Amino acid sequence: MADRRHPPTALVRPEFEVRPGEAAQIGDVARPLSTWERINNHPFTWRVVILVILAAVWELYARWLHNPLIFPAFSEMAAALWDATVRGPLIERTLTTIRVLLMGYAAGIALAAVCTTLAVSTRLGTHLLSTLTAMFNPLPAIALLPLALLWFGLGIPSLVFVIVHSVLWAVALNTHTGFLAVPETQRMAGQNYGLRGVRYVMQILIPAAFPSILAGLKIGWAFAWRTLIAAELVFGVSSRSGGLGWFIYENRNQLETAYVFAGLTTVIIIGLLVESVVFRTVETHTVRKWGMQR
Amino acid sequence: MDAPTTNGANGPLLEVDGVTLQYKTREHLVTATYRVSFQVWPSDRFVLLGPSGCGKSTLLKGVGGFMTPVEGTMRLGGRVIERPGPDRMMVFQEFDQLLPWKTVQQNVMFPLRLSGRFARAEAEQRALTYIHKVQLTEFRDAYPHTLSGGMKQRVAIARAMAMEPEILLMDEPFAALDALTRRQMQEELLQLWEDTQFTMLFVTHSIEEAIVVGSRILVLSPHPGQVKAELNAHAFDHAAQGGRAFQTLQQRLHNMLFAERLEAEQALTHG
């Protein structure tokens, strides 16, 4: 017989109450991690270990191959890098490149800000942005270089133009996607405070969409680098001082392969530094602290 | 804005008069409420009660200024409600209503500073007072993602109350909490009300919560929301829960909300 209120007597067990033990008797409720565990948890440790392993593999393979003209060893590259930095034009070339890069990057971000503001405030803007992004995002910026050279001549304006093209669409697309993903409740909370227009965008939408915006900025940065180095390789030197791309091109022509590798390594080092110092610092002080990203 | 026609102290604070609210989904134009009228007087704990689909949340959004009625008017202190504003602070059901990039204290201070009514020091003092009232003083520098659901709702309530709005709008604020926390939060809310006797408009689908929290209950029918009854519940709190009067009211509300189902069942048995 299944009766909810009167189960078979065999199933009715005695009741009991106990007093829970004191917290002090249980031992460590929370204990700090050991130094080793902390080092192990730090992403920087992992990155260094991986880089060291990669460098070792490179060195060993190059020594086994024994053909410095085609594939110089890590040590030869390091020597070339040191030589080009101390005596050669590497620092000057790098600075030229970074100057142009920052100009294009800043202009691209400013334009992206204008585009996305238009896109969130009007319906025409929304459709305009999504259409333009769909059209131009897949178009390689370097493909526009011949046109840019025709319009702006051989010089910095052409470079800035192609960088803007490579940054603008990636940043605008990510920012707009981020704005669309802001939770309805946060939007309503902001409106509830009486926020409207630009203040609403600045105080609610931008911080709420910050993870996407940051992702856009990272992608934009990488695109800008690629485009600029490629552009410098294509049309070489504009005025007296060429950039990193020109440094690579020049050394390849002179068959100084170790220096070619030194130039490429410089690009990589700057990329790593910007990623692991600049972007990571921004991340720890924003999206990670706010619990928007792990 | 119209000139005030009623004085808050000796007349209704919020007048909702024949309000029809509609919203668009991708395929339909949905009528959420149809010609709903009610009045909220100062210090009322006014509850909108109804099953899901009776438009009670939509009605609250209307009062919040997030929706414009297609028919009828809504006035707060005699002024027609046109847009969202800090005189009607809203507490939402969702935990993500706090701004994740601000600490507890910054979240409470933000609307105070935006309103321009308070200088920095004063806003800070005020925020701390209300954070203390909801017992979160030791978490004032914590970011929202480190708090539990109940704590987040407490911050939202502190944030809304620190503004001392004319009316506090609460959209099922405890619905996403577990039963124990919910009961505790209801008690704390009533305690806070005893301190300052603020006016609130509270949406819920729980009969028990409506009776315990509310002083007056507006019962709405579903699809579209229409007024079914307006009852008094000021005599009941958690302590009254086992009592006969409480259970009578509970049964009465239950019958009202499930009347359609009862009729359908009767039609089945008798037909």
Image: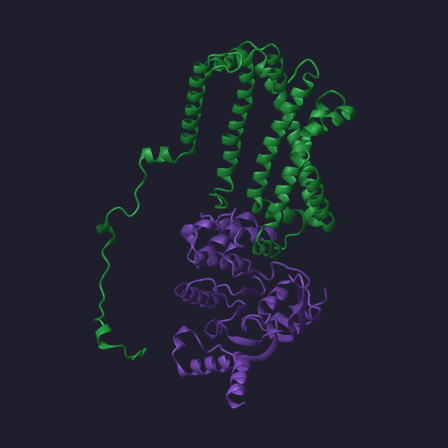
Chain colours: A green, B purple
Residue A66 is situated, as x and y percent measured from the top left of the image, at: 46, 12
- Residue lying farthest bottom? B270
Asked if residue B12 can be seen in this view, the reply is yes
Residue A186 is situated, as x and y percent measured from the top left of the image, at: 57, 54
Q: Quadrant of residue B134?
A: bottom left
Q: Residue at x 59, y 50 (%)?
A: A181
Q: Nearer the viewer, residue A80 or B205?
A: A80
Depicted A138 relative to depicted A205: above or below: above
Horizontal side of A194 relative to A15 (left or right) equals right
Quadrant of the rendering where the N terminus of chain B is positioned: bottom right
Depicted B8 relative to depicted A30: above or below: below
Residue A77 is situated, as x and y percent measured from the top left of the image, at: 50, 15
Q: Residue at x 51, y 71 (%)?
A: B205
Q: Nearer the viewer, residue A20 or A178?
A: A178
Quadrant of the rendering where the C terminus of chain B is positioned: bottom right
Q: Nearer the viewer, residue A84 or A31?
A: A84
Q: Residue at x 64, y 66 (%)?
A: B62
Q: Residue at x 67, y 47 (%)?
A: A198
- Residue lying farthest front? A65
Horizontal side of B251 relative to A93 (left or right) equals left
- Residue lying farthest right? A151
Asked if residue B11 can be seen in this view, the reply is no
Horizontal side of A181 relative to A145 (left or right) equals left
Residue B77 is situated, as x and y percent measured from the top left of the image, at: 64, 68
Q: Nearer the viewer, residue A241 or B127?
A: A241
How many discs mark residues in the rendered view?
Answer: 0
